[in-house]
Amino acid sequence: MKEKERHPSATSIMKRPKKRLMVLSGRAHPELAQEVAAELGTELVPTSAYNFANGEIYVRFEESVRGADVFVVQSHTAPINEAIMEHLLMIDAAKRASAKRITVVMPFYGYARQDKKHRGREPISARLMADMFLVAGADRLICVDLHTDQIQGFFDGPVDHLMAIPILSGYVADKYGHEDLAVVSPDAGRIKVAEQWSKRLGGAPLAFVHKTRDINRPNETVANRVVGDVEGRVCVLVDDMIDTGGTIAKAADAIMEAGAKDVVIAATHPILSGPAVERLQACRAREIIVTNTLPIPPENEFEGLTTLSIAPLISAAVKEVFLDGSVTSLFGERS
């Protein structure tokens, strides 16, 4: 006697639901989030967000995110603590609304410079940030040019560390590739990043600025001398961020005094706090190239400042994560 054919129970559901990608944005930098969504061929989820009279923040998504693969985009710009808190609340809202997976997209990671203790009785704020996002409900982080690579290990989950070098170096190569170039690091600690730039600019020679920093006076350094041959060359001065502009402006002037033909500054994150604009305009750099990981208000824009969009890179990473592909493949030789 033949064994009866087995059929699925009438009470079970065998159909697998389709994956849904949803992009959510806070109020810190909605223009970038809109660019990312457009690159992905979708739109931002309508969101209500406002502050109560006492400063507390309220957020609510106007569409269901149940079962969706959500990407919560927020740059930690000034006022930075408000931007971070809003980001955390959006993640909590998505978790409580039964999102299937929550990926936090932070083009600029707040508190990244506080990644270790310089003296006793100090916090490691970058680690605390990672813990807060994990507790809020984040399953994965996507970041751009972290201040130090070790921050990837602070988050107990997958971290995709994107690099803006392909975008920045591509622009520099197209515009200045015919010149005799040199790549200059603003300090010895970022020489590995400068080496990656050198590879992308045809093996341009390396140099770095020897500087000293007073741990009691944040954002202030003294550029002592340039180590390396920069004479007669167009020097590409590379860094991850420009905050008050003091370090990078002093480094540019030191490079010119060492005999460079010209200086081009390339940095990923344009924080541009306080006197940054005045310092950059006054320094001897020909051009300052940044990305739009942070919003630049109209009053901070000036002649010689070039802003490149980071949205194609972020959207490509989001697509790879959504499709369970390889984010590493976006960077070619990076392993």
Image (spheres, grey):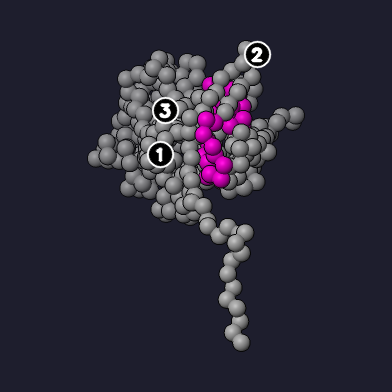
Q: Is residue 293 above or below residue 16?
A: above
Label of residue 333 in the image: none
Label of residue 42 in the image: 1
Q: Which residues are magenta?
A: 61-90
Left or right of 198 in this view: 14: right
Q: Is residue 65 magenta?
A: yes
Label 2 amino acid? Asn
| Circle 3 residue | 31
Left or right of 42 in this view: 75: right
Residues 49 and 162: in front is 49
Describe the element under mark 3 as helix, strand or loop.
Answer: helix
Residues 3 and 114: in front is 3
Left or right of 209 in this view: 301: left
Give the label, 3 or 1, closer to the camera: 1
Residues 71 and 48: in front is 48
Q: Would residue 113 be visible to someone looking at this image?
A: no
Q: Is residue 75 magenta?
A: yes
Locate the N terminus and report the quarter of the image it occupies.
bottom right
Expressed as whole percent of the image width and height from the top left, the position of residue 146 reads 53, 38
Describe the element under mark 1 as helix, strand or loop.
Answer: loop
| Circle 2 residue | 54
Which comes sooner in the sequence, label 3 or label 1? 3
Expressed as whole percent of the image width and height from the top left, the position of residue 59 reads 58, 26
Residue sitting at the far bottom: 1
- Give the CA separation, mark 1 to mark 2: 35 Å
- Give the CA separation, mark 2 to mark 3: 27 Å
Expressed as whole percent of the image width and height from the top left, the position of residue 212 reads 56, 28
